[in-house]
Amino acid sequence: MGLSELDRNLLQRCLQREPRAWENFVDRFLGVVVHVIQHTAQSRSLRISPQDRDDLAAEVFLTLINEDYAVLRRFRGQSSLATYLTVIARRVVVRELLKRKTVSGLNEEAASEAILVQRGPSDEERISDRDEIEQILRTLHGPEADVIRMYHLEGKTYREISTKVGMPENTIGPTLSRARAKMRKAGIDASGR
């Protein structure tokens, strides 16, 4: 689905700073942003308070207006505006959730995983997992195995892995998370904990 005429006009009005345009924009897309916040938190087993939700929504909209609507100016209209905003909102929410040291209702395992994703394992953790990682690599195939190998055994960054495997950098973390879940299910802990 492409950009609707209604959204095209609303976007133009915002970029031209017409009166009430921003308020109309927020009214139109607040539901999308809130849905992204709730879905993103839920997918990470995080419970967020209404205040956290409001703070995250404010951060998303602040990102949209920063630098004279730079994010909105980059929109090329090759998808619906809601789809574009969903991607932007998700990136902002994930970044903000990782920044927070404590999130109310965050269970211990999710907190450890969030901290692990934020800082990544140290070289000691990567090396101490070598036998276990190699064992699980025998059950993984394709890009997932490559990502695990490069990250845990070779110590490569997300950017280096992205370049090597031709996968977008923002998909490396989710790929690692899925593989870690498989490892936990198999009784192998890839985080060194």
Image (tube, rainbow, N blue to C red):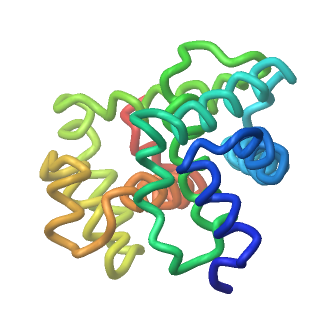
Q: Does residue 41 show up?
A: no
Task: Say which residue appears at 68% left-offset and 28% top-offset.
Answer: 58
| Left or right side of 166 for 9 | right
Task: Measuring from the top left, give residue 145's x and y in whole percent.
Answer: 32, 70
Determine whether 98 is above or below 127 in the image: above
**Residue 113 spot, x, y in % from top left:** 52, 34
Q: In the drawing, does residue 166 fall left or right of residue 154?
A: right
Residue 110 quadrant: top right
Residue 91 location (% of width, % of height): 51, 47
Taking the spot 45% from the left edge, 49% from the top edge, the residue there is 71
Q: Determine whether, in the image, residue 79 is placed left or right of residue 69.
A: right
Quadrant of the image containing the C terminus: top left
Label count reads 0
Judging depth in this view, the residue of 87 and 192 nearest the camera is 87
Q: Position of residue 189 (x, y in %)?
A: 46, 43
Q: Can you see residue 89?
A: yes
Q: Residue at x 73, y 42 (%)?
A: 37
